[in-house]
Amino acid sequence: MGTILFFQLSGIAWPVLAIMSLAIVNGLLTSIALETVILSRQMALAMAFRTAIGMSLISMVSMEVAMNVVDVAMTGGARLSLTVIPFMLAAGFITPLPYNYWRLKALGKACH
């Protein structure tokens, strides 16, 4: 969401697909960095990084894509508004749940 807001406030005219792609990459990098820092308290840094990449890549990509699709569907482009944010957050929360449930229950694999 931060990437979209930056382009919206700065008035930089980029194509919607470019803004959404940048938002997805930023979301992934932020998530991996945060998870690596948190996990590094429990394990070596290299192992924490590998674990962070492995545990959230599919979930994060699906969440970011769902949030961006809702944004485009409701606003017609990469334009955030207070009315669309709750719907984006709901879509981002619900979308990766089946994969996360399957990973935790069916495979017996968790991030910790």
Image (cartoon, grey):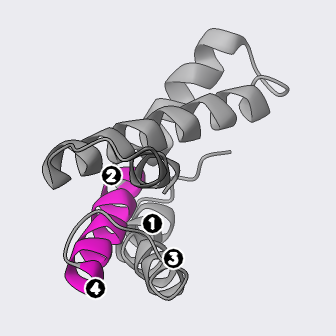
Q: Which of 13 and 45 is in front in this view?
A: 13
Amino acid beneath label 3: Leu
- CB contact under 8 Å: marks 4 and 1: no
Q: What stretch is highlighted in magenta?
A: 59-75
Quickly name the residue at label 4: 74
Q: Does the magenta stretch include residue 73?
A: yes
Where in the figure is residue 22, as x and y percent of width and height?
31, 39
Disc 1 and disc 3 in contact, CB within 8 angstroms: no
Q: Which residue lies furthest to the front in this view?
A: 11
Task: Identify which amino acid the numbered label 2 is placed on.
Answer: Val
Mark 4 or 1, which is nearer the eye?
A: 4
- Residue 89 is inside the magenta segment: no
Instruction: Tell me what residue is drawn at x 44 percent, y 37 percent.
Output: 26
Q: In this view, does 9 lie above or below 93?
A: above
Q: How far apart are marks 4 and 1 (CA)?
A: 27 Å
Q: Identify the residue shown where x is 44% and y is 72%.
A: 92
Q: Cα distance, mark 1 to mark 3? A: 17 Å
Q: Which mark is first along the chain, 1 or 4?
A: 4
37 with respect to 24 (left or right): right
* Mark number displayed over residue 91: none
State which quarter of the image contains the C terminus: top right
Circle 1 is placed at which residue position? 100
**Residue under numbered circle 3:** 89
* Disc nearest the viewer among 2 and 3: 3
Along the polypeptide, which appears first: circle 2 or circle 3? Answer: 2
